[in-house]
């Protein structure tokens, strides 16, 4: 095992590990969603809004491109990616960072049996941040330890951003999901007026703005979906949150014990269901859901047996039809990290025009949220602020 020198560190709980990924002003390396706090998220969301605003105008967009124009980013993506890769690249372009990529390890010295650790250290010689997506669950974390060890020896190190590590974690997706939810749950209309919130309060007088006091329903591949794990961990930090996990019967697709325990310990009311049509707490699940987070079955993690079993399973209870989408409350948000599966069709195109469908906006929000994260990592937040003044 190539991460042998970090085995002991990798085994620890995230509470023990996370201080090592922190900097004096917040985040040094972003490895897991547990590092994000509601305060940091608020800060990132404000900066994402600011970057969005500045980008809309030629003159301010030009100034924004000067913010990190002296920095270079390495996008090391050896697992398929469209949105995460492109939105990171667009985020770099917005802030003026130059970026380079390795997407196919066959074109790097990995074919000459170079270790990941040597490869990453080489990237750190040429670039100022490494953004990485790999099939291996602990590689980004191990790279962060490597960088910390180099830092403590007084050698050159760079920040590591985990852009998806196996079936483990995807913290920047959780950040953009929460950014989308925060915008959606302001319940304002396009012009920013609160009259929509007032209308919704007439239907549900207990409705509140923000992420607290909400029911989040996650549907699909709960066990192997890294986006679910990261988002649930982050949302668990908000008060009075209920989560319902809806998954097919195969144990590998269901909520695992470790995540359940983490959520329960954080005070989340955790429920499970076997269909979107299920009755929970005496009422239809759909009618109680404020956010429906749909996911695809992660077939790339299947064993041969999984494939046989899943192919023989009726997945219609986990499919959001147009009719089911209409049974969600009027204020509900439908999210999906994408890609959606065009064969299983967990969200058919007929749902796309439903006003609750936020998934295309969610993907675009990834660009602003990731730009805000890069601004933070490079300590350029106050300079960003001055661009707006
Ligand atoms: C997700 C991923 O790669 O984990 N996609 C993404 O980053 N937007 C979800 C998935 O692949 O199902």
Image (cartoon, rainbow, N blue to C red):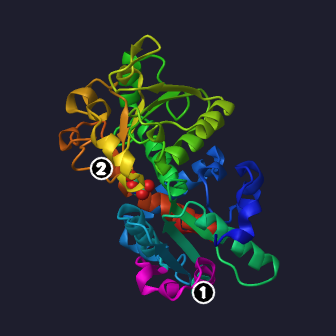
Viewer-side residue, 172 vs 49: 172
Q: Could you tell me residue 53's position as x and y percent?
A: 43, 59
Inter-mark Cα distance, 1 to 2: 35 Å
Q: Is residue 359 left or right of residue 379?
A: left
| Lower position in the chain sequence, tag 1 or tag 2 | 1
In this rendering, does residue 12 appear at all? Answer: yes
Q: Which residue is mark 1?
A: 122
Q: Residue furthest right?
A: 153
Which residue shows up at 68% across the image and 66% down it?
A: 28
Viewer-side residue, 158 vs 164: 164
Q: Which residues are magenta?
A: 98-122
Viewer-side residue, 308 vs 21: 308
Which residue shows up at 56% across the image and 31% down it?
A: 212
In the rendered image, which quarter contains the N terminus? bottom right
- Secondary structure beneath dot 1 equals helix
Report which quarter residue 79 is drawn in. Answer: bottom left
Viewer-side residue, 287 vs 59: 287
Are dots 1 and 2 in contact, CB under 8 Å? no
How packed mark 1 is, by other alpha carbons closer than 10 Å (few <14, some 14-19, many 20 or more), is few
- Secondary structure beneath dot 2 equals loop
Q: Residue furthest left?
A: 350
In the rendered image, which quarter contains the C terminus? bottom right
Q: Could you tell me residue 115's position as x and y percent?
A: 59, 81
Q: Is residue 71 above or below residue 14?
A: below
Asked whether 175 falls inside the magenta stretch, the response is no
Confirm if mark 1 falls within 8 A of ligand 1. Answer: no
Q: Is residue 150 above or below residue 29?
A: below
Q: Could you tell me residue 29's position as x and y percent?
A: 65, 65
Q: Is residue 310 left or right of residue 272?
A: left
In this rendering, does residue 379 appear at all? Answer: no
Residue 340: numbered disc: 2
Q: Could you tell me residue 102's position as x and y percent?
A: 45, 80
């Amino acid at each position: 095992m190539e991460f042998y020198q970090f085995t002991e560190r990798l085994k620890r709980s995230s509470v023990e590990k996370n201080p090592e990924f922190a900097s004096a002003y917040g985040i040094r390396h972003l490895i897991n969603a547990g590092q994000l706090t509601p305060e940091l998220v608020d800060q990132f969301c404000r900066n994402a809004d600011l970057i969005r605003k500045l980008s809309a105008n030629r003159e301010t967009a030009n100034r924004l491109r000067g913010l990190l124009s002296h920095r270079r980013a390495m996008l090391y993506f050896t697992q398929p990616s469209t949105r995460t890769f492109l939105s990171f690249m667009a985020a770099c372009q917005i802030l003026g960072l130059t970026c380079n990529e390795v997407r196919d390890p066959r074109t790097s010295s990995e074919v000459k049996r170079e270790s990941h650790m040597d490869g990453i250290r080489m990237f750190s010689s040429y670039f100022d941040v490494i953004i990485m997506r790999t099939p291996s669950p602990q590689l980004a974390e191990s790279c962060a330890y490597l960088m910390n060890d180099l830092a403590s020896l007084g050698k050159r190190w760079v920040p590591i951003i985990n852009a998806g590590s196996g079936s483990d974690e995807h913290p920047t997706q959780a950040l953009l999901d929460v950014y989308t939810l925060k915008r959606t749950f302001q319940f304002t209309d396009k012009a920013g007026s609160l009259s929509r919130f007032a209308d919704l309060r007439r239907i549900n007088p207990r409705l509140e703005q923000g992420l607290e006091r909400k029911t989040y329903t996650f549907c699909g591949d709960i066990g192997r979906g890294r986006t679910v794990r990261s988002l649930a961990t982050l949302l668990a930090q908000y008060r009075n949150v209920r989560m319902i996990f809806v998954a097919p019967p195969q144990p590998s697709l269901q909520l695992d014990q470790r995540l359940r325990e983490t959520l329960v310990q954080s005070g989340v009311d955790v429920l499970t269901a076997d269909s979107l049509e299920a009755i929970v707490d005496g009422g239809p699940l759909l009618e109680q859901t404020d956010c429906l987070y749909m996911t695809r079955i992660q077939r790339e993690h299947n064993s041969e047996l999984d494939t046989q079993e899943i192919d023989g399973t009726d997945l219609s209870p986990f499919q959001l039809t147009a009719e089911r989408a209409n049974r969600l409350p009027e204020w509900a948000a439908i999210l999906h990290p994408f890609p959606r599966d065009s064969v299983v069709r967990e969200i058919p195109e007929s749902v796309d025009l439903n006003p609750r469908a936020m998934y295309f906006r969610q993907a675009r929000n990834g660009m602003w949220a990731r730009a805000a994260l890069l601004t933070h990592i490079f300590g350029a937040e106050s300079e960003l602020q001055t661009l707006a003044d």
